[in-house]
Image (cartoon, rainbow, N blue to C red):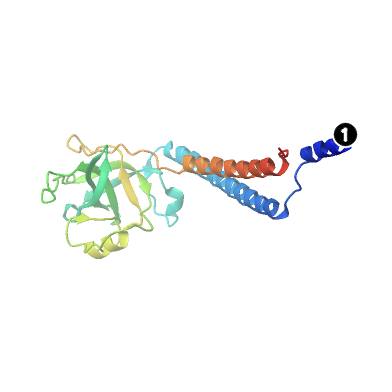
Amino acid sequence: MTTSAGSATASTRPRRVAPVPTLATIVVVALCVTAGVWQRDRMAQKMALRAAFDAVAAQPAVALPPTADWAAWRFRPVTVTGTFDAAHQILIDNKVRAGRAGFLVVAPLVMADRRVVLVDRGWVPAGRSRAELPQVPPPGGIVTLTGRINLPPASYFELAPDSGAGPVWQNLDLTRAERAFGIALVPVIVEQTIPVGPGDELARDRPPPDFGINTHRMYMVQWFIFAALAGGLWAWFTFRRRR
């Protein structure tokens, strides 16, 4: 009877906590929780950026300001008055809209104070072949257009450097544009949002930028699940009863 009771007691005794798996689990859980908290903080930052974008986009359009702090004006609606430099209009290649390839049409606009700003006039579909470029000349004469300020990309990928000699460019680079056009440019891009006239029919349905909020949320949940899974597996293998 004593032996049987002792055997029963031993069979129900929990396993001794192993130090190495326990330490490894603590490290894994700590790393996963840290990564999840970082993703949560990044998500909060991106949500604040989206709220700021919505607030800025709702403001009335104002004249393009003479300022050096263009980052503070990003996405702000503006109006610009001037004359398009049709000779230097370019097409930014490989821009897809609704599953169809096309170009962004970009042209310099010379304002009354002699400043020159690049205007993203909108999107146009590509032709049947690469030799058939779309013909979308800018409106002539003095025009007033409405758009939003955006900053040029700080970096981009390209297979080979653009020569800047033809109308089709892989990417929009302000430094390259200044060299190719031989003019100084305001260091922003005005993304036109409203047609200038009846013939100005480029596509301009510009969605809000993707701030990556859902991506950060997905990674946050993923890291917290990994932490819970690691802790749960450790508990299962540590405290399960001997069979």
Residue 108 vs 232, above or below: the answer is below
Who's the residue at 64% across and 42% down the image?
233
Foreground residue among 141 and 146? 146
Q: Residues within 10 Å of mark 1 (few under 14, many from 20)?
A: few
Does residue 106 appear in the picture of this structure? no
| The N terminus, quarter of image | top right
Residue 92 vs 224, above or below: the answer is below
Who's the residue at 39% across and 39% down the image?
208
The kind of residue on which mark 1 rests is: Met
Image side of residue 242 versus residue 106, left or right: right
Q: Count the labels in the image.
A: 1
Report the residue that reaches farthest toward the right: 2
Q: Percent position (x, y) of residue 109? A: 25, 51
| The C terminus, quarter of image | top right
Foreground residue among 203 and 211? 211
Image side of residue 196 versus residue 208, left or right: left
Q: Which residue is mark 1?
A: 1
Q: Percent position (x, y) of residue 131? A: 10, 51
Foreground residue among 111 and 189? 189
Foreground residue among 149 and 212? 212
Who's the residue at 60% across and 46% down the image?
37
